[in-house]
Structure formats: C-alpha cells, structure tokens
Amino acid sequence: MTKEVLLDVGVILDYVLGTGDYTSVQYIIDKISNHQLYGFFPAGLVPLLSHLFEQKVTETPHSSTTYSKDKLKEVMSHLQLITTTGKDISAILDTGSSLTIEAAKRVCPDVMFITDCLSSLKQSKAFTPGAFVEYYKNRRKKKTDQVFFLNLKREYTNLMEEVDQALLSVGAKAQYIMGPEVSQFETDAASYIGTKHAIGVASGTDALVLALRALAIHQREQEFFNEEDLIITSAFTFTATGDAILRAGATPLFVGIDPDSFNLNVEHVKKALSTDHVDKHRIVGILPVHLFGHSCDMDAIMNIAEQHSLFVLEDVAQAFGAEWKGEKLGSIGTIGAFSFYPTKNLGGFGDGGLVTTCDDRLAELVGMLLGHGGKDKYNVEHIGYNSRLDTIQASILQVKMRYIDEFNLRRRKIAEFYDQGLQDLKDIKLPLLYYDSYQHIYHQYTICVTDGRRDQLRSALKEKGIDTMVYYPIPLHQMKVFDGQCVKGEELENVESVCSEVLNLPIGPLTSCEEVELVVTSIREFFYGGN
C-alpha cells in the first residue's frame, strides 16, 4: 500500500524538535524515506515554518539548534513541496475548504492530511499522526489496494519538483519548438549512450522510419528502399518494428527467436542468409530488437552484418541504459532508434524518440528528414516529415535521465526478488538471468506459463487487484497488415508458442517491496496453494 500524505507545519516541527507525538511522526517519516508513503509539504507554509522554527530553537541550547537544523534538512529531503496557485485560492473562496488541502489535491486528489491542529482535523481525510499510523497499519493487513502494472502517477510524484521546474522554465522561455532543452538533451543522451550524434524525433516509430530512410538515401542514393529489399527482424515485437520497414519501402523478413531471451535467434538469421527461399529478394540489413530490456547477441549480429555487408539498426525502444559487454545499446550498430513513450523505462509525458549514430552523414540526413526533408524548410531536398521532439518532452526527459541508472537498478532488484520467489515453480519459466555480457534492465519482467493456464493465472491475479499484461499476443507474421507484405523465415513456431505463454508482471522502478511480495505470494497460491 502506497499513499500520499500531506504533513502540516506542526507535524514537521514535532519531528524536528522531538516534541509532541514524536514516535508516530517518526514512523510516518520512515515510511516516506522507504517509499512506502509519499510525503508533501505546501510551499506556502515555508515562511511560517521558518518563523516558528526560529522562535522555538532560540529557546533551546546551541547544540540542540544545530541538531534541529539537521533534522529539518533531513525531513525536507524526503518531502515534495506543493505550490499554491490562484486557482487554489479561488477554490477555497467558493467552497470554504483548506487552502493547504486544495493545493495538495491538485496533485494528489486522494491525499491524506496529517495534522495536530483541531480545526484542520474537521477536514475530510485529516488525521492526527497517531490516528494515521493506526489507520495505515490496519490497511496494510487488509492488502486490498491495487498493484498497478506501472504507476506513472507515482513516478511523477517522486520527481514532481524537478519536473514542474522544468515545465515552468519551458513556459517562461516560450521556445516550444526546438528550444534549447532539445539540443541539451541530445548532447546529454549522446554522451550517455556513447555515440557522436543523438537526434530527437517525435516518436519511437518515427525514429525507426527516419533511420531506415536515412540508410536508404545514404547507401542506395534513393528516397526509399524497394520491395525487393529485405530487412531481417524478429516476429516477436511490437507492430512498429515491422511497420517501419514497410514505411521505408522495404519488406520485413521475419525470423524466429531464442525462447530464453525472446530476442532475435542468430542461428535463424544465418539460415535466412544461406537459403534460396528469398528468390528475387535481396537482404540489405538486420533490425535486432532488444526486447524487454535484454540485449541481443550483438557480437554475433555485427559479425554476420560485416560478412554480408549489411547495416544494423538497433531497436532500443525498451532498453535505454542497457548494455552489451560494457557498451550501451544504440551505440553498437550502424544506427539506433529509441522510444520515449510514457511506459518506457525512460519515458516522457507523451510521444518522443531518439536516433543515435556515429555516422555524420546519417545524422545529417535524419536531421533533415525530421524537419520536412531539408536544411531549409522552404527549399527541401528529400521527402521528409514533421517529426521534431517537443521542447516540453525534452525538458522532462532531461530530468528523468538523471535517474535512469538508479531506476534501472531498482528494476533489476525487483527482478531478483521475483527470481528468488518464483524459481522453484515448475509450471512457469523465468526470464533469462542477466550475465556480465548483458546487463538486462528489465523494462519488462516476462514469465512463460508453460502449463496452458496463462489466462487463468492472469484472471486470478486480477481478482487480487494485480495488473499484468501480455506482450505480445499475436506475432507479426500473423498480423493482417503484413499479409502479402512480408517474407517468413523458417522456425516461426517457437514465436507462436511464446505468444500463448508470456505474461508480464509489475516491475515499475517504484513498485514497493510489499507489492512485489503480494505478486509472488499470489502466483504461488495459484499453483501450489501458497506452499
């Protein structure tokens, strides 16, 4: 159970000075520091807090004054400040409610108010520290709260001050298209990933399309590939991967996967290159998808590409920050494509994408294509797009990228907990453990339910309030859009089998230990009655 709580000034002072119901306040602060509660403090009360604090500490010895300031600094490091707007003031004039609570409800509609003020306790969802602790402990025993598959609201709450500051800064500058935040984010991303260039675009799908279009222009000196041009990719991925190949004029050649990693099967790639079934087609490139945050075998793929003079476009939509042998994904192939869709491990507040490369010409072409096809939009050279990364999205991504390594590490810790709790269950198959070569970042934690009861398990978890997802129920080679517009490699049966077994469990970076424990316990109860 994770709840948002708003701490009144008196409650903060009790904690800082060790007065009042100190034990209960300490309990609440501990839960906030462990991310079991999210704590807020209205910014409008900062001057009042400062005034009261100065009054009280002057009555104590000098040693206590220093201690109190340290405690104040500590508690404020765990709280998010909520600003008050004119709208909040208008609301209290209309309703007569508390300004403090109205300001908090704008961010957290269900926030609980912790106060020792008798008049404030008349408000809805207001508790004394002691009463809240009792309420919280009772609710934990019931375990009735929903476990979200990915709690984006919680993520915003965790980064609220920094994100709000970034948004306000964009608004103040009013440079909404290609503002300085875009170029700064591109610079930061290129440095982090280890490429010479990083170009922001409007979505992950656009990143794939623009990368392929740039490759066609650069390598073939034509706007698009031809239908005879085949690009090898996995049949087990999101639609955009195969769709981007069609949009670039080429034909996808779908091959099977490694059932342990869910990624492109290198042996199937070799077979596709050595058989005659492609007839009049010619293979021009490989599009490996680092699915669920797990790297493909990039050594093998790059060796194959070099032997056959093929380009490699890495689809890194689900693996920002993941590595292969110490190198960040998106820096190994000819060019890389990322997605910043909100559910990605680095996600914005809408669509966004990135193209990475060390090739100057490819970077130049992508930069032209995203802006209608030319360096001068009034005199374009290529068939282009309107595919710029919004300044607002870039500003948010700048904030969130500061925490990407920490959040990816949290995902790995959650995955370890799942591994330990589920490893002895014979009816499910756990995702491949990450080795030194891979550094899996677990964008998804994907199990396979091997006894044919995947949908039953999912329903049972739903009844307990646990969200799950199925990525992906239908392989690309069976989708209508690719009927007659793809070439099917051999051994696609393993993809179809995996599609009927996969189940994705909650693994957001801020998923609590209690929530993960509930998922594990519920799965064990389904199969073995909890034993």
Image: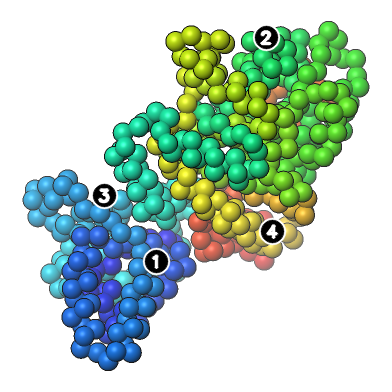
- The x, y position of residue 68, in whole percent, is 32, 81
Q: At numbered mark 3, what does the secondary structure look like: helix, strand or loop?
A: helix
Cα separation, mark 4 vs mark 2, equals 49 Å
What is the number of the mark on residue 222? Answer: 2
Cα separation, mark 1 vs mark 2, equals 56 Å
Q: Nearer the viewer, residue 415 or 371?
A: 371
Eyeballing the image, is 47 above or below 327? below
Q: Nearer the viewer, residue 75 or 468?
A: 75
Eyeballing the image, is 423 above or below 178? below
Eyeballing the image, is 63 above or below 380? below
Q: At numbered mark 1, what does the secondary structure look like: helix, strand or loop?
A: loop
What is the number of the mark on residue 106? Answer: 3
Marks 4 and 2, the one that precedes in the sequence:
2
Task: Give the residue type at disc 2.
Answer: Gln
Task: Give the residue type at disc 3.
Answer: Arg
Mark 1 — residue?
Answer: 78
Quarter of the figure that contains the N terminus: bottom left
Neighbours of disc 1 within 10 Å: few (<14), some (14-19), many (20+): some
Mark 4 — residue?
Answer: 419
Q: At numbered mark 4, what does the secondary structure look like: helix, strand or loop?
A: helix
